[in-house]
Image (spheres, rainbow, N blue to C red):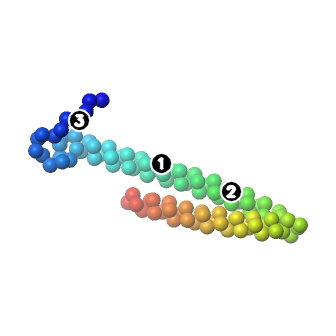
Amino acid sequence: MLPARPDTSGAPAGTGRHAGSRQREAKSGHHACMATTRAELSSIASTLTELTQRVTALAERCRGGRDAELAAELFAVERDLRAALRRLGRTSSETRSARA
């Protein structure tokens, strides 16, 4: 690629014949990144939900028996996972509102 030639037209920066094209590229790149980010966050939330369900099921199987201590620890992990899901949900909402 050839080096860019300096602008000697005297026009203000960002007003040349390619300025609109560059601005559109930057804007569309930003929206593509936001869409990718939202999709990734949604995927992570789905995975966390599934993991939370698995931990809960395991904790419930361990409750009441000789694994009561393990069950208590697993229920603590479940609470932490649910907190992570809520935080991720808030982050996702902030991401959506940032693009508006």
Residue receiving disc 2: 51
Disc 1 marks which amino acid? Thr
Disc 2 marks which amino acid? Leu
Looking at the rendered image, the disc whose residue lies closer to the viewer, 1 or 3, is: 3
Residue receiving disc 3: 4
Quarter of the figure with the C terminus: bottom left
Mark seen at residue 6: none
Residue receiving disc 1: 36
Q: Nearer the viewer, residue 96 or 70?
A: 70
- Total number of numbered labels? 3
Dot 3 crowding, Cα within 10 Å, few <14, some 14–19, many 20+: few
The answer to whether marks 1 and 3 mark residues whose Cβ atoms lie closer than 8 Å is: no
Disc 3 marks which amino acid? Ala
Which residue occupies 55% across, 54% down? 42
Which residue occupies 73% across, 60% down? 55
In the rendered view, does 97 fall on the left or right side of 66? left
